[in-house]
Structure formats: C-alpha cells, structure tokens
Image: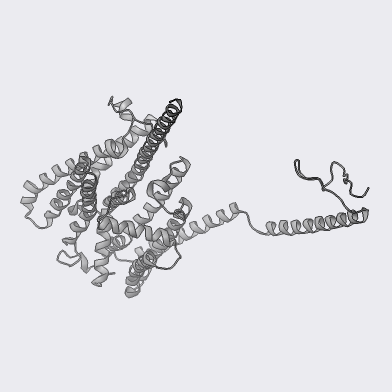
C-alpha cells in the first residue's frame, strides 16, 4: 500500500539498529529495486576496496619483522665499530697507545655518559607511566612533551653517532690522517651544540627549549624555584665529572691540542694541574646552593638552609683534593689529605641522610629501623622491604665512593673514575624514582586536603542556608 511500512527479513542489511527510526517507503517496488541495486553495487565496491587494502597490508612487513631487522643492523654496526677500533689501536706503538687512548677517552666519555643518562631517563618515564605517576603534572610539562619512546629514540641516535665518531677518530689517527682525526670530536661537539640551540621546529623544539630554559634558571636562580629546576640541578651534581671532562676537551679544541699528547704535560694550559678543573667540578653544587638560598628567601623555611649546608660541604672536598698539585708532598700527606678525608666522610653521610629522610621520606624506616614517622608506601614497589633495603644500602655505598670521582688528584685513574661515575648515575637513576614518587604523594595529599576543606565549606554553607530557611 502507498505510504505503508516496508517489511524486510530479519537478516536484511537494510535493518537499522535498535532504537533508530523506521525506514518508510513512499514509493513502489521500482524504487525498492533501485535501492537494492545501489546497495549491491556499494557492497561490491566495498569488497573490492577491502581486497585492495588486504593486498596492501600483505605487502607491508610486520612491526616485529621491522624491529628484528633494526636490531640486526644495530649489532652489525656495533661489530664493525669494535673491529675497526680494535685494529686501529693495535696499529699504534705500545708507548703511544695508553696516552692516546686516554685522550680519545677524554673526548668521548662525556657524551657516552650523557647518552647513558638519556637512556635511564627514558626508563624513569616508562616506570612513571606504568605506575600512574603523573610526571607531566609534577614537572609542569607541555602537552607535546617527550614520551619514553621518543626519549629512547633520541638515545638510540646518540648511541649510534658518538661511537661512530670515536671509531673514525681512532681509524684516521692510526692511519696517519692526524688533521682529519682531530676534526672528528670537534665536529661532533659543534653538531651537538647546534642541535640544542637550533631555532626551527624540528628535533623536538619545545623539549629542547624547555631544557635550555631550565638550565638558564639553574644558572641564574632569579625566580621562584620549581620542582623541575632543583630536580635537574640535582642530576647535574651527579654529572660534575662529565662537565669537568667537557671543559678539558673544549680547552684542547680551542688551543688546537686535539690528536696530540702535548696537553699531557703538567704545565700545559689544559693539563692535569689546571685550576679550571676544580672550578668546573664545584659549579653544579654552587648552583644548587644558590637555589636553596633563593628558596629560603621565598618561603623562610629553615629546611632550605640545612639543604644549602649539605651542598656547601662539597666545596672543601673538591678544593682540598686539588691542592695536591699546588702544595709540597709532605704538606699534602700530613695536613691536607686528612682534612680531605674528613670533609669527604662528612659530605657523604650528610647527603645520605638527606636522601633517605628528606628527598625520599621512606616509610620503610617505620618498620625496619623503628622510626616513628609512618607514611604512605611506595606506589612503585608496593612496600616490599627488600627494595628499600637495597636502595638504602646501595645509596650509602655509592655516596661514599662519590668522593673518589670528585677528587682532582685521582683523575688519572680514568677507567676507575669512569666506572664510579657510571655507578653514580645509576644511583641517581634509582634516586629519581623515589624522589618523584614522594613529590607525587605530596601533591595528592595537598589535593585531598583542599577537597576536604572545600567539602567542609560547602557543608557549612548548606547548614547556614537551612538555618536561614528555618528562621
């Protein structure tokens, strides 16, 4: 009948979803046939398109296959670098080999350690994301901040570029191309500096400028100190040896001492007796000290002064150690060395105490050491005791070895100092977990207090309104 409802079988593709309007046909069978033909044509086109899509998908390799291929290329590249580097070192004479390796190590070990720190920071971000710790809110990051995957991508490129430049340096020097060899670390350092300050919207512009702004705020703490300011400044204190080696490397590049052993002399401008070495070592601690003083100026909290005192204890450790090159051997052994050891022990124990009680506020002390400050268990490790025992023990040991890596008179034991610097970065890596988690706990506590105060205010307002109505 004209204007009636069109009936369709239960399995008809024309049926709409439940709750939708009914399909009303104002035309006859002719229109219905046209609609059916259009649908069949559309269905045929859909099948054709799906088959085309399937064929395209079949051509593309799977993500797992691509990942395996990248890993294979990475191992092949690593093998080539190791093989070329080893053959280049073996071509040198035995008396020259150790001195040259020390110089090559000095140019590239700072960037290798920075690469390692980037890898570890990516692991930190991954754990924060898995543990529902809102690090974006804690560090006040932009919406286009780097995730752990992007951080790992940057670390991967750094892992490839730095050893490749070092391999080229060794190969060119061993084959007599001294000038080309000297250009390798120079070009690498220039490239790193240019990428950091590149003003165009590539290479994660917002994240690079966020880092540069934070570094500027650390160097000149003329504003209120944010969490990201002193968090990065604390990380820089663990990289003091990296900055010292960077200073010595740049000094040699400026004075054209790359790919030579003239700098090894004590009276050289960039030699081991340089006054700039302890000055650069102490800079991160001075930055952190000034931050604490600024924080005390803003908040008038005495805790900031005690924290400043902690960083001030690093100054005598560094400068007493550097005095070995400027005093008589008897004076160093009988007077300055005992003072250096005393200041080292004081700084290590003070820093250890501050890590546990202030930076981490570990609740394990309540159960293990019978302290009377109960607190929330760690979100990351769910209060497992062995984790706390490991963190406390390893932090104490590595805090005590910290003085060895900062000691200017021990800098020639470069492999040992490098190993201790790596351990110090691992200590800072695990420190970051508990420090960020503690800050997240504080933020949640403040939010809960504000919500409870708001609820109390609303209840008081409602009670006043009800009393007014009753009156």
Q: Residue at x 31, y 27 (%)?
A: 366
Where's residue 467, x and y in %? 42, 26
Q: Is 103 situated left or right of 140 in this image? A: left
Closer to us: 230 or 382: 230
Q: Is 128 situated left or right of 397 in this image? A: right
Please, which residue is most extreme toward the front here? 471
Q: Is residue 106 in view?
A: yes
State which quadrant residue 399 falls in.
top left
Q: Is residue 16 above or below residue 62?
A: above
| Colouring rule applied to residues | one colour
State which quadrant residue 181 falls in.
bottom left
Where's residue 9, x and y in %? 87, 43
Q: Is 447 situated left or right of 273 in this image? A: right
Please count the marks in the image: 0
Q: Residue at x 45, y 46 (%)?
A: 126
Q: Quadrant of the C terminus?
A: top left
Where's residue 295, x and y in %? 24, 47
Q: Is residue 109 in view?
A: no
Closer to us: 313 or 37: 37
Q: Is residue 73 above or below residue 439?
A: below
Where's residue 120, x and y in %? 39, 49
Closer to us: 341 or 368: 368
Q: Residue at x 33, y 61 (%)?
A: 108
């Amino acid at each position: 009948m004209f204007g009636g409802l069109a009936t369709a079988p239960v399995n008809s593709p024309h049926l709409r979803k439940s709750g939708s309007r009914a399909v009303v046909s104002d035309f006859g069978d002719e229109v219905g046939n046209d609609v059916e033909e259009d649908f069949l044509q559309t269905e045929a086109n859909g099948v054709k398109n799906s088959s085309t899509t399937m064929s395209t998908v079949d051509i593309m390799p799977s993500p797992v296959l691509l990942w395996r291929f990248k890993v294979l290329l990475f191992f092949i590249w690593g093998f080539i670098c190791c093989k070329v580097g080893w053959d280049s070192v073996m071509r040198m004479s035995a008396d020259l080999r150790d001195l040259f390796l020390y110089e090559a190590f000095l140019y590239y070990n700072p960037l290798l350690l920075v690469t390692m720190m980037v890898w570890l920071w990516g692991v930190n971000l991954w754990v924060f994301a898995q543990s529902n710790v809102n690090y974006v809110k804690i560090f006040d990051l932009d919406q286009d901040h780097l995730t752990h995957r992007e951080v790992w991508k940057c670390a991967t490129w750094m892992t490839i570029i730095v050893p490749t430049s070092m391999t080229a340096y060794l190969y060119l020097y061993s084959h007599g191309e001294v000038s080309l060899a000297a250009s390798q670390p120079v070009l690498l350092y220039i490239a790193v500096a240019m990428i950091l300050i590149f003003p165009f919207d590539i290479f994660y512009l917002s994240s690079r400028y966020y880092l540069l702004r934070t570094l500027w705020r650390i160097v000149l703490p003329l504003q209120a100190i944010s969490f990201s300011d002193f968090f990065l400044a604390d990380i820089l204190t663990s990289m003091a040896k990296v900055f010292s080696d960077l200073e010595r490397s740049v000094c040699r590049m400026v004075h054209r001492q790359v790919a030579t052993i003239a700098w090894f002399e004590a009276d050289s401008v960039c030699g081991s007796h340089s006054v700039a070495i302890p000055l650069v070592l102490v800079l991160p601690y001075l930055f952190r000290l000034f931050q604490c003083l600024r924080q005390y100026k803003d908040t008038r909290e005495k805790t900031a002064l005690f924290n400043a005192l902690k960083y001030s204890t690093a100054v005598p450790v560094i400068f007493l150690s550097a005095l070995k090159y400027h005093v008589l051997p008897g004076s160093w052994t009988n007077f300055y060395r005992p003072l250096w050891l005393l200041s080292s022990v004081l700084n290590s124990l003070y820093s250890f105490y501050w890590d546990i009680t202030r930076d981490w506020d570990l609740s394990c002390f309540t159960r293990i050491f019978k302290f009377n400050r109960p607190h929330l268990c760690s979100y990351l490790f769910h209060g497992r005791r062995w984790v706390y025992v490991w963190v406390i023990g390893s932090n104490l040991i590595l805090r005590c070895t910290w003085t060895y890596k900062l000691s200017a008179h021990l800098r020639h034991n470069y492999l040992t100092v490098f190993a201790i610097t790596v351990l110090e970065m691992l200590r800072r890596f695990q420190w970051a977990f508990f420090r960020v988690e503690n800050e997240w706990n504080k933020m949640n506590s403040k939010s809960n207090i504000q919500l409870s105060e708001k609820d109390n205010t609303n209840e008081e307002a409602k009670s006043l309104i009800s009393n007014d109505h009753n009156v």
